[in-house]
Image (spheres, rainbow, N blue to C red):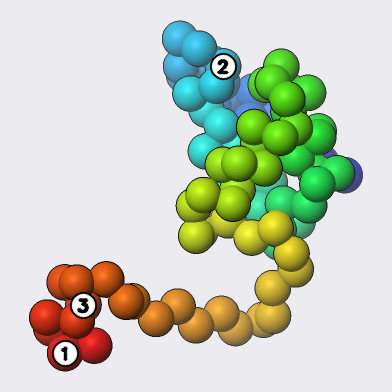
Amino acid sequence: MISAATRSQIDAEIAKYPERRGALLAALHLVQRELGHISPETATLVAQIFEIRPNEVLEVVSFYNMFYATPQPRHHVYVCTNLPCSLRGA
């Protein structure tokens, strides 16, 4: 599912960090850019690369709102609901 080009980019990101896990966010960005979302099957592949459990990858995907676990429509609207946006009139 992950292309050889993306895999080589992931390996290059891993080389930048003293621990493999440090490159997990960058790898997830690369995978999502290629596939559009991080499915459970893709999370398993990423987990194998990082030598961690697939559940740990899915925890990261569900924690950050910039990662999608399901396919997204062409246009995605994000509405800021935090305090600074509210103070500015959002």
> Is residue 67 in view?
yes
Q: Is residue 11 above or below residue 40?
A: above
Q: Residues within 10 Å of mark 2 (few under 14, many from 20)?
A: some
Residue that carries the numbered disc 3 in the rendered image: 85
Residue located farthest toward the left when viewing the structure as drawn = 87
Q: Residue at x 69, y 21 (%)?
A: 52
Q: Residue at x 74, y 64 (%)?
A: 70
Q: Quadrant of residue 68?
A: bottom right
Closer to the chain start, of discs 1 and 2, is 2
Could you give the CA–CA distance between mark 2 and mark 3, rounded to whole angstroms?
35 Å
Could you give the CA–CA distance between mark 1 and mark 2, rounded to whole angstroms?
42 Å
Q: Which mark is residue 89?
A: 1
Q: Is residue 13 left or right of residue 85?
A: right
- How many numbered marks, from 0 up? 3
Q: Quadrant of residue 55?
A: top right
Q: Residues within 10 Å of mark 1 (few under 14, many from 20)?
A: few
Q: Is residue 59 left or right of residue 47?
A: left
Q: In x, y percent, where is residue 13?
A: 54, 27
Mark 3: which amino acid?
A: Cys
